[in-house]
Image: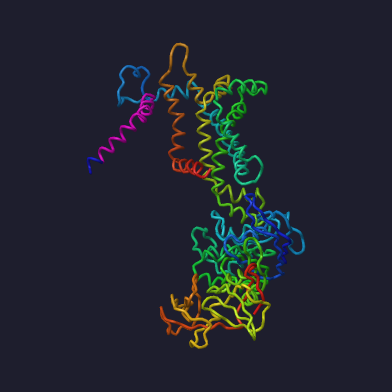
Amino acid sequence: MKVRRMLGALGVATVLAPLLFPLYWMVMSSFTQEARLFAAPALVPDALVLDHYRALFGGRDFWTPIRNSLIVAGATTGLSVGLGALCAYALARLQFRGKTVMLAFVLAVSMFPQISIVSPLYLLLRELRMINTYPGLVLPYLTFAMPLTIWLLVGFFRQLPAELEEAAAMDGAGRLRSLREIVLPLAWPGLATTAILTFLYCWNEFLFALSFTLGPERYTVPVAIALFRGQYQVPWGQILAAAVVATAPVAAIVLVAQRRIVAGLTAGAVKG
Amino acid sequence: MASITIEHLDKVYSNGHVAARDLNLAIRHGELLVLVGPSGSGKSTVLRLIAGLERPTSGRILIDDEDVTGVPPERRDLAMVFQSYALYPHKSVRENLAFGLRVRRIEAAEIRDRVQQAAATLGIEPLLDRKPAQLSGGQRQRVALGRALVREPRAFLLDEPLSNLDPLLRADTRAELALLHRRLGATMVHVTHDQEEAMTLGARVAVMRDGQLEQVGTPLEIFRRPANVFVATFLGSPAMNVWRCSCAQTGAGTRVAYRGLAVDLEGTRNLFDQDEVLVGVRPHDIGLVPPGDADAVGRVEVVEPLGATTLLHVRIDGMAGRAARIVVPADGAVAIDDEVAIRIRRDRVYLFDERTGMAVTPP
């Protein structure tokens, strides 16, 4: 029995080690002096220094990309959950022609490879004078955020018993009232899950952010990190420190909400 | 309070299922009407049509002589109690009751008073701050009723409100509901599949089958003068015995007979020689007699003591199919496999047309 349990633990460790090691290495290296990074790799470092973090926030002003990312990801999340909830509710509950076609269309839109729409989007945004602006990122982000939220939320709304809304109607509440007071409060776990997932997508997005921004004042975190590399040297220490800074909040959100996210994903999958 | 009138109402679902067929029904001001029928008979659909939760395919619905066919449910000012109760799970009992009043922009002070009053009426005051998940089935049922009550609507629509309660509680609540109706003088439409509930509760009972109204009348009318064989067998417990008999004219009247059963009826009853007819007799209207006076003899197959009475299943000689059901006093004199002789009360014999099922002549 004991042997079997130990074997099990060993198995789990074998699977987890390759997954977690890069993360560990990233965190350790971000605390290691630049000079020692390639000199003497060691699993347990002998000295931890904050040089890279100081350089990151002192010299490079890493706050700007963080602020940009927060604004863009936050705005996209807010808009897509707000609008998506209305769309999803309509698709889940109202009777109208072409509902299935519309849902399929929404899904199809999200299937386009991002790279295929970068050029047309670029031209469009240039015409609209939105290159290197926040709306210039939020709008393209909505193209993948909206289908995601709509599909997730349709599943959530369909799960809610229709009788509750019928009861609200009998109580004299119109559609919007019943949406606000009955449906949305009951669907909030779904809304939260959707918001978190959308936020993660936007936080990590690279291609659009790279294509539609021009200067450091609008770079988002992934773009800023990618463009750390100078002409003659790659500041690995700072890149890793930035990666840690970018990963930490996301990891924290996921760890706190992981149960909800999993429940949300499966709920959407089974009932949607 | 209001009267509700249904005119030529049809409801056909998109899959072709006909849930209501040319329904006409007038529910009077302050009346408690019970819609009863087997599951799938369309009774709940009728309720939902009145509520406005479903749109009729054709026909009209009038509340107080005003056509509301196109009016959405939120503007009909009716209250509904759902079978599942449909309480708002995220709101406390108090908020559940107050919601309908808040939507109507009634003053906070008045809402408080009315909620308090409704809660007192139903004895749910101690529950006001709980959430529905913390309530028992019976308590939830009361809250659902309270949510309707507090609104003081034009009419109450009750969709099998008692079916999720255990039998004892159901009987109590049924009596309370009747009392409540008397006190409020409110128009109520109560849907149930339970014929006993329909009989005890309704001032008038409407029997439905396959989307059609079979008969509307007081419980006693329907029990004593069923319009057809379906109504006759659906209402009354244990269910009526029905035999397919052939008629023969005798000197004084008509004899209906099938295998080992023969009953002489007075008068011709509009029947002729060789006519086939369905003969219905309620189990209470058959008695055990000495062999000389018998309409039939048979063997007891099953004895079901019901308490004050005993239900016998008697296999009449030569008859296949369902055994005859007979209710006798519970004196324990009859046992399984006993040979018994039975006699039918002549004034309680129901005759139905063999093809249409319609009553031939009421007894």
**Is residue B149 rendered to the left or right of residue B134?**
right
Q: Quadrant of the N terminus of chain B?
A: bottom right
**Is residue A51 rendered to the left or right of residue B255?**
left
The image position of residue B65, as x and y in percent, is: 77, 63
In the image, residue A18 lies in the stretch drawn in magenta:
yes
The image position of residue A136, as x and y in percent, is: 61, 26
The image position of residue B293, as x and y in percent, is: 52, 87
Q: Quadrant of residue A68?
A: top right
Which residue is at a point 67% across and 21% down the rendered structure image?
A127
Q: Quadrant of the C terminus of chain B?
A: bottom right
Which residue is at a point 72% across and 55% down the rendered structure image?
B58
| In this view, A92 is above or below B101 | above
User: Which region shows up in magenta?
Assistant: A5-30
Q: Quadrant of residue B36?
A: bottom right
Q: Is residue B313 visible?
A: no
The image position of residue A19, as x and y in percent, is: 37, 30
| In this view, A66 is above or below B278 | above
> In the image as oriented, which residue stretches furthest toward the top?
A232
In the image, residue B135 lies in the stretch drawn in magenta:
no
